[in-house]
Structures are given as structure tokens and as C-alpha cells.
Amino acid sequence: MKLKQITSTIGLLLIFSALQLGCVKRIYKHSIKDFKTANNVENSLYAQWRMMESNNHIVIHVGNEMQEVYAIKYDEATDSIRANFRAFDGAPFASYQKVLEKRSQTALRSSDTYPSDIRQVHLFINEYEKLNEAELAFAASDIFQVDVTKNAVFLNALATTGIAVGSAAVGLTAFLLIVCNCPHVYIDNGEELEYNNTLFTGAKAKQLERFDYKELPDYLPTSSDYTIQIKNEDNEDQFTNLVEVVTVMHQKRIEVVADKNGEIHTLQKLEPPMRAIDNSNISVLSYLAARDDYPYRFNPLQFDDLAEVAMTFDAKNQSNDAKLLIRARNTMWSGYVYDEFNKLFGKNHGKWVEMNRDKSKMEREKWMREQGIKLMVDIKQGEKWVTYDEVEVVGDPSMNQVVIPIQRNLFGEELEVRLRSGFMFWELDYVGLDFSVNESVEVQVHKPAKATGNNGTDFTQQLSFDDNDYMQHAQKEEFNSTEVYYANLPVDTSLQRTLILKSKGYYVPKSEYTGKTDRKRLQYFVNPGELSRFSRELYYNVMQEMVAK
């Protein structure tokens, strides 16, 4: 694991390499006025920081103190970073220590070490503010030195600090612009509109129209009003059929989560798995044991078709049905992979779309399952894995939770569950099991009191009923966003209020491609898992480009 120190000078992009951090004698400080920062970066700076975090371990240094930071939120208005923090330990710390101890110019990688463990970004800062027991914040301008491993990737975010990045940043702008398609949902948090989630992600054709259920943050639990904004920010036509807010009033000691059909389940005592291993038989339990935005990214060292996690839960002395809670989200990388797949059709992409226009829902979803686009849920029956259920595509802005009910007669003293995904298509933050009986809760469904498009169009009727009357948003036309207001939500300070956004619709991408059709490469995508293998191929190619000298 080689370490590079990145610094800046007037008008130049310089990368200084240090074979061991312990050999670095000088500290290269910078001043914002000394150079031009990357103000022309077209993609979201928030996305850049998230992308860097998703692919590297980010460690801050203040004096002799080290903390690993995660769930990073970059605030462009204040040029500051807010993040959760934890001890920097485990395999990543061990790799870092090998460099510090000068055992070799390149730290050895054992067979059970993930490539991600040796992709590290170390930020040396003057100070930080501890916001609470879990969060801290610091100004980007307080970063005076950055050390990165040779393997570190997606470093565009560092340009926001004024520390220029060389070859590692080349070509990333186009990649980062490819984020989750589908309608984007912004929530009024009392101060501003906050991008929070997406609607019916993955429903890229009329045949794939479906209901979608996602939990909403309840920023103002004592208010009976709630406002969201639905925006089309992608090159596509969006057709939204229904958008309702479901309120669930329940005891504060329990948690409420919906399954993929919108049925409400109560959770009281979640237990993580006893064991969790990936395709390479490496334990990934540390990623799944807590809801901490420290996810497993389905990037095993070895796999054939799909990446997978096999988990074992203790079910001794349990007589009730089980409720499997999955907390996950899709990756921005998966959007990039699908776009690269579309590019293989070249100028004939439109013809391919037209040819598949009448393909049935069953055919379309079969391919999505085979390629790991949906998150597949299997249960061990005897010595055989049996596909039991699936998690619909949820998008990348936020972690989403879903419950998978499992009947008691399907498992014995242990319950073995396997989740399967395409290579790096999903981030899995937590998996837990609850055996409590569902408690009675008060559920109300709220239709929009008012829905007004940004050109003044009234869409209240279109969003209130499941019918053939849609709210249509086209990005390049004047009506591409709608503010939706809900009234008369129940308020009871003695109870907990959980909000769930119920929506239905679909969207049609309008992207156009050029160039020749790669027929030889395309013929392989009829095989199960080919998109997953394509993803791994792309990822390794991108990483090689990032570290190329």
C-alpha cells in the first residue's frame, strides 16, 4: 500500500509520493488564494464527497488523534464537512500500520483483505468540532495536508478543499453525473428543501409501473402539515400516478417498517446475524451488525454470477414467524454501469428500445433478477438455496428499510438467509431478525390537499388516485417540478409518528447514444449475471485508470 501526499502550488497540479508516511518530514500547507479551485466542476460536490467515501476509508488526523469518518455530508454553502466518526481500526488500520512501521515499500495484502481496506484517504486538519457523541464537523479550509494510498479512487472531492488532484480525477465528471434516475423527492424540513429519496426507482417502462413505499423523515412531529417537492432532474419523461402519505401512530418503544406491499410491521427486538460471509467465505458481519451507514458493498474478491452474503440467525426457542429487516440502498455506480451497458448499442440504442417496447413485465423483471439489479432474498431449505423474495430497486439518495416476513415452518433452530446482488449494485448497511408479534397501530392514508406544478398547473387530482390520469414531468419543458402539500396529519406527543410515502408510476429515459454497436459484447448479456461481471470489469478498469502514473 503506497501512500501519496497531495498538495498544491500556483497554477500547477502536483502529486508528491511518499513510500512511507513516516518518512514525510515537511507539511505542505495551502491557502485558498494561492490557486484556482475546481469551480467548473459540473457535478454535485455532495456527490463527490459521498463517492470518495463509498470507495475509500476516510481518516482525519488532528495532532496524534485519528478518527475514521463516514456518512459524510458536504455543505457547499459553508464549505464544511459533517460526518459520523468511529475508531480507525481493523484491517484498514493494520495495513496503514505496515506502512508506518516501514516493513516494506508496499504493505503486503493477505488473502482475506479486501481491496477496499487498502484504499485510504487521510485528511490532516487543524481542528474539528464534536457535535455530539456520534458526529463531528470541520471546515474544508482547515485541511492542510492529504495523504492517499496508491489504490485510492474517486478523489474529485479533494478539489473542493483547494488541494488539487492529478490523474485520479480525470474522467470522473461524466461518471458522477450519472446518478439515480426517476422522480426525485425533496422534503421541507422547516428551513429548506432537502433531497431525500426517489419514487418507483427502476420502473423504466409502462410495463414496470409499480407501487413504492419509502419512509419519510418526520422533521416536525408536532405539525399536522407536510410538504414535499417532486422534481424531474434527469433526461427522461416521468409519469406519476399516485403520491400519498401514510401515517402510523404507535408506541415509542416499537419501530414501524413496511414490506414491499405496503403492509405495516412492528419491530421490538432486532437481532443481527450470528454469522455473515460473502462468496469468498470472508466474514462481513462487522458491516451488517449496526445501522451506522457503514455498508457492505457486494464487492467480494471472487464470484461467478452475483455477489452474495449468506447469513445465519439464531431461531432457537422461537415459535413466531420471523420479520427480516433489510436496510440498504442502490449505488451511484450501478447507474454508471447501466449507462455503459446502453452505450454498447451505440447509435442503434433507440432501435433496441423500440424493439423491446412491448416486452412483458415478466420478461423484463426476469432479466433484472438474473443480473442482480433487484436484491434477491434466498432461504436455505435443507441443503438447497431457494429464492424466497426480492427487494425492489430503491435508488441511491438514502438508506431504505424493508421487512421480509418469513413463515415459521420454513426454518428450524437456525434461519439461513442469502442476499444476492450484482457487483457493487447495492450497499447493505444492516440486516436483523425480529420474532415479536405485530402490535396494533393506527394507520391513516392522506391524499394531497394540494399539488401545484411550477408552471401553476393543479396536479391534485392526478396524484390522488390510482388510475390512468398521470402527472407528467418532462425535464426540458416548463413543468418539471410539483410541490405537494398534505394536511390534517395526526399529532399525539404521547405516541411516535412514522411517515411512509406511497407512490405509483413509471418513467421513460430519453438518453441518446452514438457510435458503433458492439454486437460481440452484447451477445453475452443473455447470460445470467453478465451485467454483474460487466460491472466488475468496468470497476477494475476505472481503478487502473485512477492509479495510472
Image (cartoon, rainbow, N blue to C red):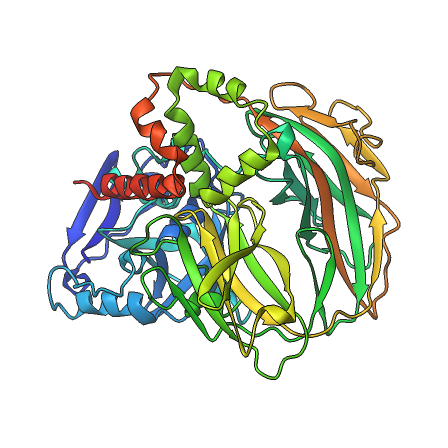
User: Could you say where residue 134 lies in the image, as x and y percent from the top left?
Assistant: 52, 68
- For image coordinates 45% across by 46% down, the residue present is 425
- For image coordinates 76% across by 40% down, the residue present is 243
User: Could you say where residue 518 lies in the image, as x and y percent from the top left?
Assistant: 32, 23
User: Could you say where residue 405 lies in the image, as x and y percent from the top left?
Assistant: 65, 62
Corner quadrant of residue 36? top left
Image position of 491 with respect to 37: above or below: below
Q: Nearer the viewer, residue 47 or 472?
A: 472
Rendered-image quadrant of the C terminus: top left
| Residue most extreme to the bottom | 317
Compared across the picture, whether 460 is left or right of 241 comes to right
Compared across the picture, whether 46 is left or right of 546 comes to right
Image position of 472 with respect to 505: above or below: above
Instruction: Inspect this view and state whether residue 499 appears.
Output: yes
Count of marks overlaid on the render: 0
| Residue most extreme to the left | 104
Rendered-image quadrant of the N terminus: bottom left
- For image coordinates 29% across by 34% down, the residue present is 170
Instruction: Inspect this view and state whether residue 40 appears.
Output: no
Corner quadrant of residue 175? top left
Corner quadrant of residue 206? top right
Compared across the picture, whether 420 is left or right of 152 comes to right
- For image coordinates 86% across by 57% down, the residue present is 490
Q: Nearer the viewer, residue 503 or 13?
A: 503
User: Could you say where residue 72 lies in the image, as x and y percent from the top left?
Assistant: 47, 54
Image position of 154 with respect to 274: above or below: above
